[in-house]
Image (tube, grey):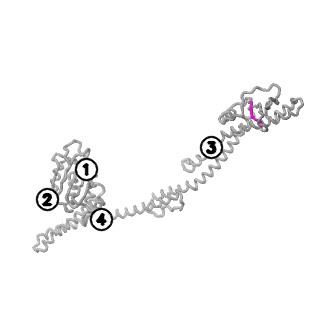
Amino acid sequence: MLLRSLSARLLVLTIFFVMVSEVLIFVPSVARFRMTYFENRLAAGHIATVALEASTTGELEPALTEKLLAQAGALGVAVHRPDGTVLRLDRAGPPQPNLTINLAHPDALRAIRGSFRTLLGNGGRVLRVLGPSTTDPTETVEVLLDEAPLRSEMWDFGVRILELSVVISLVTAALVYLSLQWLLVRPMRRITASMMNFREDPEDVLRMIDASGRRDEIGVAERELGVLQKTVRQALGQHARLAALGTAVTKINHDLRSILATARLVTDGLTASAAPEVRRVAPRLVDAIDRAVALCTQTLDFSREGAPPLAPSRFSIAALIDEIGPGLGLSGDGLAIDCAIPPGLTVKADRDQLYRVLLNLARNAVEAGARRLCFTAAREDKVTAIEIVDDGPGLPPKARDNLFRPFFGSARPGGSGLGLAIARELMRAHGGELALVSSTGSGTVFRLTLPAPARALNRAPMSSP
């Protein structure tokens, strides 16, 4: 569980990365240590040969030779001078070298390979090392070395590097860990805790995050989270008020529709009154009551959760259009309805609901001033498209911008804008769509689409009045 936390993972990764860095540093370091070891032995061997110059015979006692070689840490030493003379300091029967190393031509990769061969070997080789003198570059110093002491010192050096690396890793990891805890982990925990507390009770203002005032990315995240929580809290409050208001409106509409039904019955009696003034006002009163009942019905329909249940069946579109005129009750009052749909073109849908959508569009067009309606339909790919074209004055800009928004999209004064919203909801319940194609001063075109039946039928061209 500990390694699942962000802070623990950062600590482990920091230690790992520091150790990797130390390993990368160790490789050239150990190669350099080996080269320094050789250079020191060359310098010590050169100094040891100075005793030969003080000897009148050019030779030293065997005991002194052993002592000088031991001080130089070599099995044998030779100095090659430019004039061809050689000063040699070695014991009787010197060992044969297994490997020659020339420091006059250094090679980094070869030095690294040689270092690892020494570290991983058994230390039983004799090395012949050549290099220029530190005091006179024209002289070449040659030493014979036992690899075992070199290997031992290299391992000691490696252990010290490892111990130092561990200390550096732990110190660095601790500092990085504390810095990340202060700069990142603790603020993230604070933000996460605020999210969890806010989720439990979004309406509690005390559960909103209090920004720390930082100007970095954490500070931006805190401020944006505070804005988000405030927005969500306001939206939840508004939705709660709207839900309560919707419930109240639904109840009021239900009761109001009952009251209006009673008023409608009374008004019907007024039309038979003997008083001329009453008979003249009664039709307008009946129309006002009918509009009020329609508004109540639309509001109740819109407040219903989800689309109404559908009863799909296959029927002719042209036959359905023939019922629009009688449904409007205005066909004899100068209204012309053209149906350019073949009788054989059918659609599978809820007949009553589709009739309701078409009747709503037709009534809106007539109330806006249209005197001619034209219905066309055609099969297009996998959908059946129905277009309603009128010759009305077109929709005002405000109505077009809020066309399908409830209570905003009405094109006439006093309208609720619920008709088109409900019509679009019914079309989408069928898997189709209702859209405005165009609206100009010469007329408006609405387009309905429905999934086409599986069996291909006639294709009728679109036409306009």
Looking at the image, tell me whether mark 4 or mark 2 is earlier in sequence order.
4
Q: Which residue is mark 1?
A: 449
Residues packed near mark 1 inside 10 Å, few (<14), some (14 to 19) or many (20 plus): many
Query: Which quarter of the rendering shows the C terminus?
Result: bottom left
Q: Which residue is mark 3?
A: 21
Residues packed near mark 2 inside 10 Å, few (<14), some (14 to 19) or many (20 plus): some
Q: How many angstroms separate mark 4 from mark 2 (CA)?
A: 35 Å
Report which quarter residue 324 is drawn in.
Answer: bottom left
- Specify the segment rendered in magenta: 128-133
Looking at the image, tell me whether mark 4 or mark 3 is earlier in sequence order.
3
Q: How many angstroms separate mark 1 from mark 3 (CA)?
A: 67 Å
x, y percentage for residue 379? 22, 46
The amino acid on which the numbered mark 4 sits, given as a three-letter code, is Val
Q: Which residue is mark 2?
A: 331
Q: Is residue 458 visible?
A: yes
Q: How many angstroms separate mark 1 from mark 2 (CA)?
A: 26 Å
Q: Nearer the viewer, mark 4 or mark 1?
A: 1
- Identity of the residue drawn at 80% across and 29% down: 84
